[in-house]
Image: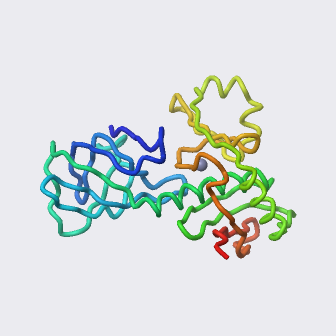
Amino acid sequence: MTEEIFREDAYVKSCEAHVTAHTEDGVILDRTVFYPEGGGQPGDTGILNVAGGTQIRITQTLKGKGDVAGSIVHLIEEGVELPAIGDSVTVELDWDRRYAHMRMHTLLHLMLSLVNAKINGAAVGAVKSRMDFDLGDLVLDKEHLTEELNRLITEDHSVRASWISDQELEERPELVRTMSVQPPTGHGMVRLMEIDQIDLQPCGGTHVLSTSEIGRVKIGKIENKGKHNRRVNLVFDND
Ligand SMILES: [Zn+2]
Protein backbone atom coordinates (compact mmCIF):
# COMPACT_ATOMS: atom_id res chain seq x y z
CA MET A 1 0.00 0.00 0.00
CA THR A 2 1.17 3.51 -0.79
CA GLU A 3 0.36 6.38 1.59
CA GLU A 4 -1.63 8.84 -0.56
CA ILE A 5 -0.56 12.28 0.64
CA PHE A 6 -2.51 14.05 -2.16
CA ARG A 7 -5.84 12.82 -0.73
CA GLU A 8 -5.38 14.80 2.47
CA ASP A 9 -3.50 17.75 1.00
CA ALA A 10 -3.45 18.29 -2.77
CA TYR A 11 -1.01 21.22 -2.42
CA VAL A 12 2.04 19.21 -1.29
CA LYS A 13 4.45 19.43 -4.23
CA SER A 14 7.15 17.01 -3.09
CA CYS A 15 7.91 14.39 -0.47
CA GLU A 16 10.61 12.03 0.71
CA ALA A 17 9.88 8.34 0.32
CA HIS A 18 11.41 4.87 0.12
CA VAL A 19 11.30 2.51 -2.83
CA THR A 20 9.31 -0.56 -1.75
CA ALA A 21 9.02 -2.47 -5.04
CA HIS A 22 9.76 -2.45 -8.77
CA THR A 23 7.38 -3.10 -11.62
CA GLU A 24 8.40 -3.75 -15.22
CA ASP A 25 8.88 -0.04 -15.97
CA GLY A 26 8.32 1.76 -12.72
CA VAL A 27 8.72 2.01 -8.97
CA ILE A 28 6.38 1.77 -6.01
CA LEU A 29 7.06 4.02 -3.03
CA ASP A 30 5.84 3.85 0.57
CA ARG A 31 4.28 7.34 0.18
CA THR A 32 3.67 9.81 -2.63
CA VAL A 33 2.22 13.17 -3.67
CA PHE A 34 1.60 11.84 -7.23
CA TYR A 35 -2.05 11.34 -8.27
CA PRO A 36 -2.64 8.12 -10.27
CA GLU A 37 -4.73 8.38 -13.46
CA GLY A 38 -8.41 7.84 -12.71
CA GLY A 39 -11.82 9.43 -12.42
CA GLY A 40 -11.20 11.44 -15.60
CA GLN A 41 -8.07 13.08 -14.20
CA PRO A 42 -4.64 12.33 -15.76
CA GLY A 43 -1.83 10.78 -13.74
CA ASP A 44 0.89 13.14 -12.50
CA THR A 45 4.34 13.58 -13.99
CA GLY A 46 7.53 14.95 -12.43
CA ILE A 47 10.96 14.09 -11.10
CA LEU A 48 12.36 11.29 -8.94
CA ASN A 49 15.51 12.48 -7.16
CA VAL A 50 17.84 9.67 -6.20
CA ALA A 51 20.70 9.89 -3.68
CA GLY A 52 23.86 11.13 -5.40
CA GLY A 53 21.99 13.78 -7.39
CA THR A 54 20.57 11.65 -10.20
CA GLN A 55 17.23 12.91 -11.52
CA ILE A 56 14.84 10.51 -13.23
CA ARG A 57 11.69 11.56 -15.14
CA ILE A 58 8.38 10.14 -13.94
CA THR A 59 6.35 9.98 -17.15
CA GLN A 60 3.04 8.67 -15.79
CA THR A 61 1.40 7.59 -12.54
CA LEU A 62 -1.06 4.70 -12.39
CA LYS A 63 -2.95 2.63 -9.86
CA GLY A 64 -1.25 -0.72 -9.29
CA LYS A 65 -3.09 -3.81 -10.50
CA GLY A 66 -2.90 -7.51 -9.66
CA ASP A 67 -0.30 -8.25 -6.99
CA VAL A 68 0.47 -4.53 -6.55
CA ALA A 69 -3.19 -3.46 -6.14
CA GLY A 70 -3.52 -0.72 -3.52
CA SER A 71 -0.14 0.70 -4.50
CA ILE A 72 0.69 3.56 -6.82
CA VAL A 73 3.07 2.93 -9.70
CA HIS A 74 5.38 5.70 -10.92
CA LEU A 75 6.40 4.93 -14.50
CA ILE A 76 10.00 5.90 -15.27
CA GLU A 77 11.53 7.18 -18.51
CA GLU A 78 12.88 4.40 -20.72
CA GLY A 79 16.46 3.17 -20.51
CA VAL A 80 17.13 4.40 -17.00
CA GLU A 81 18.26 2.19 -14.14
CA LEU A 82 15.67 2.00 -11.35
CA PRO A 83 16.72 2.97 -7.82
CA ALA A 84 17.16 -0.07 -5.56
CA ILE A 85 14.46 -1.31 -3.21
CA GLY A 86 14.94 0.39 0.15
CA ASP A 87 16.59 3.50 -1.39
CA SER A 88 15.56 6.94 -0.11
CA VAL A 89 14.22 9.18 -2.86
CA THR A 90 12.43 12.50 -3.21
CA VAL A 91 9.57 12.92 -5.66
CA GLU A 92 8.69 16.32 -7.09
CA LEU A 93 5.53 17.11 -9.05
CA ASP A 94 5.26 19.01 -12.33
CA TRP A 95 3.30 21.46 -10.24
CA ASP A 96 2.02 23.81 -12.96
CA ARG A 97 0.43 20.89 -14.79
CA ARG A 98 -1.08 19.37 -11.63
CA TYR A 99 -2.39 22.74 -10.39
CA ALA A 100 -4.11 23.25 -13.76
CA HIS A 101 -5.70 19.81 -13.30
CA MET A 102 -6.90 20.82 -9.81
CA ARG A 103 -8.46 24.03 -11.15
CA MET A 104 -10.07 22.24 -14.10
CA HIS A 105 -11.31 19.37 -11.96
CA THR A 106 -13.00 21.77 -9.53
CA LEU A 107 -14.53 23.56 -12.52
CA LEU A 108 -16.17 20.30 -13.62
CA HIS A 109 -17.92 20.13 -10.23
CA LEU A 110 -19.29 23.64 -10.83
CA MET A 111 -20.62 22.43 -14.19
CA LEU A 112 -22.38 19.51 -12.51
CA SER A 113 -24.22 22.00 -10.31
CA LEU A 114 -25.40 24.03 -13.34
CA VAL A 115 -26.30 21.36 -15.88
CA ASN A 116 -29.24 19.25 -14.82
CA ALA A 117 -28.52 16.19 -16.97
CA LYS A 118 -26.96 12.76 -16.78
CA ILE A 119 -23.19 12.82 -17.19
CA ASN A 120 -21.71 10.15 -19.49
CA GLY A 121 -18.06 10.92 -18.85
CA ALA A 122 -15.43 13.59 -18.32
CA ALA A 123 -11.77 14.20 -19.03
CA VAL A 124 -9.65 16.78 -17.22
CA GLY A 125 -6.77 18.44 -19.08
CA ALA A 126 -4.30 21.17 -18.19
CA VAL A 127 -5.49 23.35 -21.08
CA LYS A 128 -8.87 21.96 -22.06
CA SER A 129 -11.37 19.66 -20.37
CA ARG A 130 -14.51 18.04 -21.63
CA MET A 131 -17.74 16.69 -20.21
CA ASP A 132 -20.20 14.42 -22.00
CA PHE A 133 -23.86 14.84 -21.08
CA ASP A 134 -27.05 13.11 -22.08
CA LEU A 135 -29.01 16.34 -22.47
CA GLY A 136 -32.26 14.94 -23.87
CA ASP A 137 -34.25 17.99 -25.03
CA LEU A 138 -32.20 20.40 -22.96
CA VAL A 139 -30.36 23.04 -25.01
CA LEU A 140 -27.31 24.63 -23.41
CA ASP A 141 -26.78 28.37 -23.72
CA LYS A 142 -23.00 28.75 -23.99
CA GLU A 143 -22.86 32.44 -23.10
CA HIS A 144 -25.19 32.12 -20.13
CA LEU A 145 -23.37 29.04 -18.82
CA THR A 146 -20.01 30.83 -19.12
CA GLU A 147 -21.40 33.77 -17.13
CA GLU A 148 -22.78 31.48 -14.43
CA LEU A 149 -19.50 29.58 -14.09
CA ASN A 150 -17.52 32.79 -13.74
CA ARG A 151 -20.03 34.08 -11.18
CA LEU A 152 -19.58 30.94 -9.02
CA ILE A 153 -15.80 31.24 -9.40
CA THR A 154 -15.77 34.91 -8.37
CA GLU A 155 -18.05 34.20 -5.39
CA ASP A 156 -15.11 32.29 -3.90
CA HIS A 157 -16.82 29.22 -2.41
CA SER A 158 -14.72 26.93 -0.23
CA VAL A 159 -14.05 23.35 -1.34
CA ARG A 160 -13.51 20.53 1.14
CA ALA A 161 -13.30 16.75 1.34
CA SER A 162 -14.95 14.51 3.90
CA TRP A 163 -15.39 10.77 4.32
CA ILE A 164 -18.70 9.02 4.85
CA SER A 165 -19.42 5.35 5.54
CA ASP A 166 -21.53 3.17 3.22
CA GLN A 167 -23.98 2.81 6.08
CA GLU A 168 -24.37 6.57 6.66
CA LEU A 169 -24.96 7.03 2.92
CA GLU A 170 -27.64 4.37 3.00
CA GLU A 171 -29.32 6.14 5.90
CA ARG A 172 -29.30 9.48 4.06
CA PRO A 173 -30.85 8.80 0.62
CA GLU A 174 -31.57 12.55 0.21
CA LEU A 175 -27.81 13.10 -0.01
CA VAL A 176 -27.40 10.62 -2.87
CA ARG A 177 -30.39 12.04 -4.77
CA THR A 178 -28.61 15.37 -5.31
CA MET A 179 -25.46 13.70 -6.68
CA SER A 180 -24.92 13.48 -10.45
CA VAL A 181 -22.34 10.77 -9.83
CA GLN A 182 -23.48 7.76 -7.83
CA PRO A 183 -21.18 6.97 -4.92
CA PRO A 184 -19.29 3.68 -5.20
CA THR A 185 -20.22 1.26 -2.42
CA GLY A 186 -18.48 -1.78 -1.02
CA HIS A 187 -15.28 0.01 0.06
CA GLY A 188 -16.56 0.83 3.55
CA MET A 189 -15.93 4.55 3.17
CA VAL A 190 -16.64 7.02 0.36
CA ARG A 191 -14.82 10.33 -0.15
CA LEU A 192 -17.15 13.26 -0.76
CA MET A 193 -16.17 16.63 -2.21
CA GLU A 194 -18.28 19.57 -1.22
CA ILE A 195 -18.26 23.02 -2.76
CA ASP A 196 -19.90 25.17 -0.12
CA GLN A 197 -23.56 25.86 -1.02
CA ILE A 198 -23.07 24.52 -4.57
CA ASP A 199 -22.24 20.88 -5.06
CA LEU A 200 -21.69 17.56 -3.30
CA GLN A 201 -20.31 14.54 -5.18
CA PRO A 202 -18.31 11.41 -4.44
CA CYS A 203 -14.83 12.06 -5.85
CA GLY A 204 -11.27 10.87 -5.33
CA GLY A 205 -9.54 13.53 -7.43
CA THR A 206 -7.51 16.61 -6.52
CA HIS A 207 -9.23 20.01 -6.19
CA VAL A 208 -8.40 23.60 -5.26
CA LEU A 209 -9.45 24.91 -1.82
CA SER A 210 -11.53 27.79 -3.13
CA THR A 211 -13.37 28.38 -6.41
CA SER A 212 -11.63 31.74 -6.99
CA GLU A 213 -8.40 29.82 -7.64
CA ILE A 214 -9.92 28.46 -10.87
CA GLY A 215 -9.68 31.87 -12.58
CA ARG A 216 -11.75 32.99 -15.57
CA VAL A 217 -13.09 30.23 -17.82
CA LYS A 218 -15.25 29.85 -20.88
CA ILE A 219 -17.30 27.18 -22.58
CA GLY A 220 -15.76 26.22 -25.90
CA LYS A 221 -17.39 24.11 -28.58
CA ILE A 222 -20.41 21.99 -27.78
CA GLU A 223 -20.16 18.93 -30.04
CA ASN A 224 -22.76 16.44 -31.10
CA LYS A 225 -21.40 13.00 -30.26
CA GLY A 226 -24.35 10.72 -30.92
CA LYS A 227 -28.06 10.86 -30.20
CA HIS A 228 -27.67 10.91 -26.43
CA ASN A 229 -24.33 12.59 -26.09
CA ARG A 230 -23.28 16.26 -26.19
CA ARG A 231 -19.64 17.02 -25.52
CA VAL A 232 -19.05 20.34 -23.72
CA ASN A 233 -15.50 21.70 -23.98
CA LEU A 234 -14.18 23.96 -21.21
CA VAL A 235 -11.09 26.15 -21.36
CA PHE A 236 -9.33 28.77 -19.22
CA ASP A 237 -10.14 32.27 -20.48
CA ASN A 238 -6.76 33.97 -20.62
CA ASP A 239 -7.86 36.90 -22.83
ZN1 LIG B 1 -13.68 15.90 -8.07
Q: Is residue 32 left or right of residue 169?
A: left
Is 18 in front, or is 147? 147
Q: Position of residue 132 (x, y in %)?
A: 68, 63
Quarter of the image with the N terminus is top left
Q: Position of residue 150 (x, y in %)?
A: 75, 60
Is 237 in front, or is 225? 237
Q: Position of residue 65 (x, y in %)?
A: 35, 48
Which residue shows up at 23% across the image and 69% down it?
Answer: 78
Q: Position of residue 198 (x, y in %)?
A: 75, 44
Which residue shows up at 82% across the image and 70% down it?
Answer: 143
Scheme by which the image is coloured? rainbow
Q: Is residue 157 left or right of residue 70?
A: right
Which residue shows up at 67% across the image and 46% down it?
Answer: 181
Quarter of the image with the C terminus is bottom right
> How many tags in the picture?
0
Which residue shows up at 13% across the image and 50% down it?
Answer: 84
